[in-house]
Image (spheres, rainbow, N blue to C red):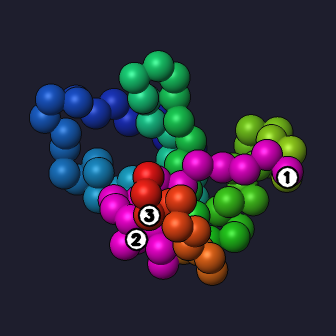
């Protein structure tokens, strides 16, 4: 594990690329949010998702949030897209 600081005003592209590389390799990346630290992983990698549950001691029935850029990306991740999701 390594800890790297990054400027929110001028993020270092090399550090961001390294974080992306770690995520693609199934590793976890911690990052600050407006209130707490987040723990990120690729939602498409079952092993990485399992590592988040393990690292946080989170029960398997407690769902994780998946961030996507738009509705089209969200639709690719689900088998059913309810009308309510379209309205939202």
Q: Which residue is mark 3?
A: 86
Q: Which residue is mark 1?
A: 60
Please give the range of residues in magenta. 61-76
In the rendered structure, the answer to whether residue 46 lies left or right of residue 3 reads right
Q: Which residue is mark 2?
A: 73
Coordinates of residue 38 in the picture (x, y in percent): 53, 36
Counting residues from the N terminus, which is met first, the one under dot 1 or under dot 3? Answer: 1
User: Relative to residue 24, is residue 10 depicted above or below?
Assistant: above
Q: Furthest residue to the top?
A: 35
- Asked whether residue 54 is drawn in magenta, I would say no
Q: Within the image, what quadrant is residue 20 found in?
A: bottom left
Q: Secondary structure at mark 1?
A: loop
CA distance for labels 2 and 1: 24 Å
Q: Which of label 2 and label 1 is nearer to you?
A: 2
Q: Are marks 2 and 3 in contact (CB under 8 Å)?
A: no
- Asked whether residue 62 is drawn in magenta, I would say yes
Q: Which quarter of the rendered picture does the N terminus lie within?
A: top right
CA distance for labels 1 and 3: 28 Å
| Viewer-proximal residue among 68 and 87 | 87
User: Relative to residue 76, is residue 52 depicted above or below?
Assistant: above
Q: Within the image, what quadrant is residue 45 found in?
A: bottom right
In the rendered structure, the answer to whether residue 76 lies left or right of residue 56 reads left
Q: Residue at x 15, y 29 (%)?
A: 9
Q: Residue at x 29, y 51 (%)?
A: 16
| Viewer-proximal residue among 52 and 2 | 52
CA distance for labels 2 and 3: 13 Å
């Amino acid at each position: 594990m390594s800890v790297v600081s990054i400027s929110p005003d001028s993020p270092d592209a090399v550090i961001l690329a390294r974080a992306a590389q770690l995520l693609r390799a199934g590793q976890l990346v911690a990052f600050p949010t407006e209130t707490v630290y987040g723990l990120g992983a690729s939602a498409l990698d079952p092993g990485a998702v399992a590592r988040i549950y393990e690292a946080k001691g989170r029960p398997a029935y407690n769902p994780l949030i998946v961030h996507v850029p738009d509705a089209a990306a969200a639709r690719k991740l689900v088998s059913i897209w309810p009308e309510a999701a379209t309205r939202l």
